[in-house]
């Protein structure tokens, strides 16, 4: 029996990357999955891949920063599958820039996709989960929410907001049997990240920043999301799980901080 047998899950941002990998892993572990993305045809491709592999999935096109879309997303999931047990609010976006460089429009856009969507997801998912006796909400934050990122002011601010919003949601809904946690990935080899790191020197710097000497894989974040979605993490709520290949653990001085001479450069 899979870890999510007989569970019903929504995964947002399911068109590619972390969302697609998580939707497929949830389905492989027995969940019926609603794959959601603003790119409807791409979400449909994820659902089709799940069904071809023997799983059970449908797709739904939604802009998760819009209340009416999120309300409809949850309603359609309940109508099609009979309830809701897991919400993985994974959709996110990035616009680079300092406070001086970033436009007000880009600030509002990123905060809408990254933060408002988490609020809206909980707003409409919680009543559906209460009807089932509880559930699990997982929110995608980032290690960027744990420290100041240069040149990405709105991304860092939005992911910090997701972490504390996660704590607040966990506090509000624990009595209803709903656990709420966040995942803070390091640098994951998704298509957008690989495009941004097409320069070999940029890629080398980012790879070397991780103690494990590589970027993360979407499937590794999916495994973390699965654990938080399942009863294996039944005593975990209000937390942010860092999955970053040792990026935050590494000294800003790099290997010079290692006292073993053989490791010095």
Image (cartoon, grey):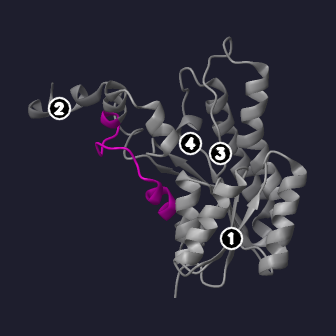
Horizontal side of residue 173 vs 241, given as left or right:
right
Whether residues under marks 2 and 1 lie with C-beta atoms below 8 angstroms apart, the answer is no
Image coordinates for residue 40, horizontal then vertical, percent: 72, 55
User: Considering the numbered disc 3 on the image, is that residue within a helix, a strand or a loop?
Assistant: helix
User: Considering the numbered disc 2 on the image, is that residue within a helix, a strand or a loop?
Assistant: loop
Q: Residue at left 76%, top 33%?
A: 109
Dot 3: within a 10 Å radius of its alpha carbon, few (fewer than 14), some, or many (20 or more) residues? many
Q: Which contiguous range is marked in magenta?
A: 207-224
Which tag, 4 or 1, sits closer to the chain's start?
1
Residue 169 sits in quarter = bottom right
Q: Quadrant of the C terminus?
A: top left
Q: CA distance from mark 2 to mark 4?
A: 30 Å
User: Considering the numbered disc 1 on the image, is that residue within a helix, a strand or a loop?
Assistant: strand
Q: Nearer the viewer, mark 4 or mark 1?
A: 1
Dot 1: within a 10 Å radius of its alpha carbon, few (fewer than 14), some, or many (20 or more) residues? many
Q: CA distance from mark 4 to mark 1?
A: 22 Å
> Up-down: is 218 above or below 161?
below
Whether residues under marks 3 and 4 lie with C-beta atoms below 8 angstroms apart, the answer is no
Which tag, 3 or 2, sits closer to the chain's start?
3
Horizontal side of residue 148 vs 164, given as left or right:
left
Which tag, 1 or 3, sits closer to the chain's start?
1
**According to the image, label 3 marks what residue?**
163
Which tag, 3 or 4, sits closer to the chain's start?
4
User: What's the mark number on residue 259?
Assistant: 2
User: What's the mark number on residue 142?
Assistant: 4
**According to the image, label 1 marks what residue?**
9
Q: Nearer the viewer, mark 3 or mark 4?
A: 4
Q: Residue at left 54%, top 26%?
A: 149
Which tag, 2 or 4, sits closer to the chain's start?
4
């Amino acid at each position: 029996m899979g870890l999510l047998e007989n569970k019903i899950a929504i995964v947002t941002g399911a068109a590619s990357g972390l969302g697609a990998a998580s939707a497929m892993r949830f389905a492989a572990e027995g969940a019926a999955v609603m794959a959601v993305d603003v790119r409807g045809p791409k979400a449909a491709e994820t659902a089709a891949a799940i069904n071809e592999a023997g799983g059970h999935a449908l797709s739904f096109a939604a802009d998760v920063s819009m209340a009416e879309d999120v309300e409809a997303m949850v309603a359609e999931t309940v109508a099609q599958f009979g309830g809701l047990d897991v919400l993985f609010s994974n959709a996110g976006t990035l616009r680079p820039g300092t406070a001086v460089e970033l436009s007000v429009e880009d600030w509002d856009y990123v905060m809408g996709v990254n933060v408002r969507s988490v609020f809206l997801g909980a707003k409409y998912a919680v009543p559906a989960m209460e009807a089932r006796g509880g559930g699990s909400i997982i929110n995608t934050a980032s290690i960027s929410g744990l420290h100041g990122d240069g040149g990405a002011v709105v991304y860092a601010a939005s992911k910090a907001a997701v972490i504390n919003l996660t704590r607040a949601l966990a506090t509000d809904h624990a009595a209803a049997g709903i656990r709420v946690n966040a995942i803070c990935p390091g640098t994951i080899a998704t298509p957008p990240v690989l495009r941004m790191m097409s320069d070999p020197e940029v890629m080398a710097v980012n790879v070397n920043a991780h103690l494990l000497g590589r970027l993360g894989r979407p499937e590794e974040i999916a495994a973390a999301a699965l654990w938080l979605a399942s009863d294996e993490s039944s005593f975990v709520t209000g937390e942010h799980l860092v999955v970053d290949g040792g990026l935050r653990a590494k000294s800003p001085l790099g290997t010079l901080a290692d006292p073993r001479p053989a490791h010095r450069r």
